[in-house]
Amino acid sequence: MSGKREEIIIVDDIATNLTIAKSALSDKYDVFTAPSGAKLLLLLKSLTPDLILLDIEMPEMDGYEVITVLKSSEKTMHIPVIFLTGKIDPEHEVKGLNLGAVDYITKPFSRELLLKRIDLHILFERQRQELLKHNLNLESEVDKKTRAIMELQNAILKSVAELVECRDNVTGGHIERTQHYLGLFINFLRERDIYTDEIQSWDIPLLIMSSQLHDVGKISIKDSILMKPGKLTVEEFTEMKKHTTYGANIISRIVESTTENDFLHYAEILAISHHERWDGAGYPHGLNGQNIPLQGRLMAIVDVYDALTNDRQYKKAFSHDKAITIIEEGLGTQFDPVLCRVFLDNNQAFHSAVILIKNGS
């Protein structure tokens, strides 16, 4: 503990009472005096004491009025206040306690009793401050651990996602780009107040982080199909489409074997639904319209945009304008028409993002 002594302010309009109380407490505490409520409030502009002894019966501004002012200010509301009074009755005692006083001491008071009561309340306040400090430290530690868990989760997702990209090296950078597009897309929706209720229920940083696993099912696709330099046969494409269910199953098995798995909730949704189509002609379940999770409908657009604007085994990259034309053709058939319109209206922002990412910015 530091050697700093606690500070007490005594408020009484009778000078003798101030002298007696100060004499009783000065050996142990730093004591300041104020002859009125107004003088106390003036003193509190430069001093925040550990406790206030406050007379009730004072002219102009009585103790009840003073404590009401004290408790209405964030700076002074937590300072313990003990009422000093020459008369006490249950009704007035209850009134004072309801206003926030911690105790009553009747006048005339004995030196020993005054000191003991002050010591007790100073101890309570010291313990309250220690508990508050402990709780703040605890919150800080919880925040640190939460950040550490998030960093670990992101590292796991990133490592698994990079494993997929290592096998499918022609689409390298796909995961980073689609994460960036997804964040942009959600911001545009929020700006235009579209699908607001649902989006507000999401943990958006977790959703964007989890989007790294949308193609995790490709781990289970044979190299001869995944890395084929050309168009897939019908049979091969049928197998390739299974990466959606493979991915959801992989994530589901991880969820079953862990307790801290909230971060995988979005990953499973994205893996299983990002190839569904608004008109029901997608896969794996042929869902249509708003039966497709909103996260999957968003991912479908950014996933296709990235595929169109980058080289793949079976095609060269299209220009941004060509990609936008193709996506516009899918409005209301392949893609949610509302989402697609937002994407098209803001297409230059996505084009700028492509340039920045490719330039390593």
Image (cartoon, rainbow, N blue to C red):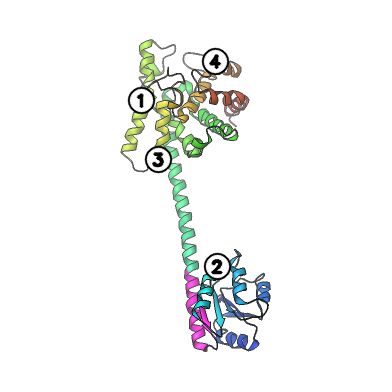
Marks 4 and 2 in Cβ contact (< 8 Å) = no
Which residue appears farthest toward the front when viewing the image?
A: 91
Which of 283 and 288 lies nearest the eye of the viewer?
288
Secondary structure beneath dot 4 equals helix
Magenta span includes 280:
no
- Kindly report the secondary structure that dominates the magenta region of the rendered protein: helix
Amino acid on which the number 3 mark rests in the picture: Asp
268 on left or right of 331? left
Q: Which residue is mark 2?
A: 78
- Mark closer to the chain start, 1 or 2: 2
Secondary structure beneath dot 3 equals helix
Marks 1 and 4 in Cβ contact (< 8 Å) = no
Which of 216 and 22 lies nearest the eye of the viewer?
22
Q: Which residue is mark 4?
A: 329
- Mark closer to the chain start, 4 or 2: 2
- Mark closer to the chain start, 1 or 4: 1
- Residue sitting at 50 percent across and 71 percent down? 125
Q: Nearer the viewer, mark 3 or mark 4?
A: 4
| Structural crowding at the residue carrying mark 4, measured as other residues with C-alpha within 10 Å and reported as few (<14), some (14–19) or many (≥20) | few
Residue 107, image quadrant: bottom right
**In this picture, which residue range is highlighted in magenta?**
103-127
Q: Nearer the viewer, mark 1 or mark 2?
A: 2
Residue 245, which numbered label? Answer: 1
- Residue sitting at 45 percent across and 28 percent down? 296
Q: How far from the left and from the top, in percent, is residue 321?
A: 61, 17
Amino acid on which the number 4 mark rests in the picture: Glu
Q: How far from the left and from the top, in percent, is residue 316?
A: 53, 14
- C-alpha span from label 4 to label 2: 65 Å
Q: Nearer the viewer, mark 2 or mark 3?
A: 2
208 on left or right of 253? right
| Structural crowding at the residue carrying mark 2, measured as other residues with C-alpha within 10 Å and reported as few (<14), some (14–19) or many (≥20) | some
Amino acid on which the number 2 mark rests in the picture: His
